[in-house]
Image: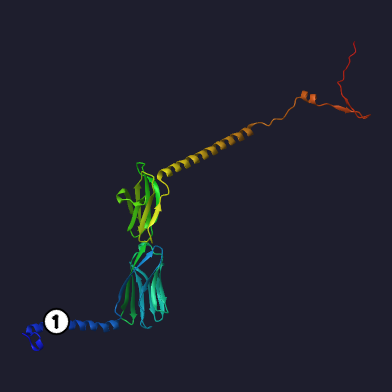
Amino acid sequence: MFGLFGTPELHLPQISKILSKCNAVTTCAWMLLSLFPAVIAGHALFNCSSDQTVRRGMSVNISCNYKPSNDSESFIVELQSNSELCSVRKMKNSWTEQLCRNHCRFIWIQETAQMAFEVSNLQINDTGIYKCVVTRFIPPPSVILKEEITFVQVIAQPTVSVSHVRAMGGFPMMLCSSEGFYPSALDQMWIRNGEFQNASLTYSINKTNPDRSFTLHSYLNISDCVNYSCWVNHSSLSQPTILHMTECYRNGDENGWIILVTLALIILTILIITVVCERSRRAHHRSPVRMNDTPASDLYSHVEYEIYSVLGDHRPVPCSPVRVHSSPQ
C-alpha cells in the first residue's frame, strides 16, 4: 500500500515505534546540551594524561595546565604521587604556605600565568604516576578545577664490560656484564667472527639490585683464539654498544705468567742485594782498628841520623857506633 506522493503507507503501530525512538533521541540530545551551562558555570574537571621518560639523576617538569579565570579565585595546587610531594596555596595575587619536599619545587610564570612542578634527581624508585590537582576553595564550596596525570618513566643506562674468567673446572670462558640498567628489557648477545652466536651456547645470570636496577651476566665457553664481541642494546642507549676482546684467553694467560715471573725475579734480586750489603756492613763493624806498628829493627834500618857540621861545606858526617876499648888488667 502506498500513500500520497508514492510513499509507503505506514500503520499506526509502526508510527508509534518511530515516534518513541525519535523522542528518546531528542531527550538524550537535550540532556547533553543541558550539561554545557553546568560545565561553564562550575569549571568542570578536565582529566589529561601524558608520559615523560627521564634518565636517572635528571629532572622533570610536571605541568598543571590551568589558568585562573580572575584574581579573586583562591585555590590550592598539589603534586601527588604515592604521597603528597608539594602543596601551594594562591590567595589573591600571592602564593603562600609552600610545603614541598627537598627534591620538589613549585614554578609559577607570572607573564603567561603557567604553573608546574619540578622534581629533581630522579631515581628508579621515582618511576610512577604523578598527579597535579587544582582545588578552588574561595568562593566556596570547594571544587576541583583541574586534575592532570603524568606518568614518569626513569631509565638507567647499562654499564657494559667484558673479561676473561675460568669456570669451576678450570675451563676458559668470557664474561659480558651489563650492570645497573632499567627497565629490565635488554638484549645481550655474543658475536664470533662477525656472526651472532646462538643463545643456547651462552649461560646467563639476571639479578635485581637493591635500587631496583638490573644486572645481566652472560658467559660463553671458548676453545679457540678468534675475534669475540659482546653486543648490548637497551632503551636508554641511542645505539647498541659493542665491546671487542683485544686478545684471546691463552695469550692473556701467558702474559699474566710472564708478568708474575718477572716480578718474582725482581723481588728475589732485591732480596739478594739486601742480604749481601747487610753482611758486608756487619763484617766491617766487627773488625778491630789496627795500628801499623813497625818493628824497631826496621826503623833503624831505614832511618839514618845525620850530623851536619857547622864548618866547611856542611857535609853530613855519618855517625858510626862508638867502640869502647877495655884495658887489660
What's under tag 1, amino acid-wise?
A: Lys
Label 1: element kind: helix
Q: Write the residue at 34% across / 76% down.
A: 134
Front-most of 225 and 45?
225
Image quadrant in which the C terminus is located: top right
| Residue 189 point in image, percent of width and height | 34, 53
Residue at image point 86% right, 27% down:
306
Q: How is the image coloured?
A: rainbow
Looking at this view, name the residue that lies furthest to the top: 329
Q: Quadrant of the N terminus?
A: bottom left
- Quick check: 236 above or below 203? below
Residue 213 seen from this side: no
Residue situated furthest bottom in the rendering: 4
- For residue 155, which quarter of the picture? bottom left
Horizontal side of residue 302 vs 109, given as left or right:
right
Q: Observer-nearest residue: 172 or 59?
A: 172
Residue 242 on image: x %, y % = 39, 55
**In the image shown, does 113 or 246 lie closer to the viewer?**
246
Residue 153 vertical position relative to residue 218 in the rendered view, above or below: below
Q: Where is residue 184 in the image (x, y as percent from the top left)?
A: 33, 58
Packing grade of label 1 (10 A; few <14, some 14-19, many >=20) is few
Q: Is residue 114 visible?
A: yes
Counting from the top left corner in percent of width and height, residue 203 is at 32, 49
- For label 1, the residue is 21
Q: How many marks on residues?
A: 1
- Based on the displayed image, in which of its 4 quarters is residue 63 positioned? bottom left
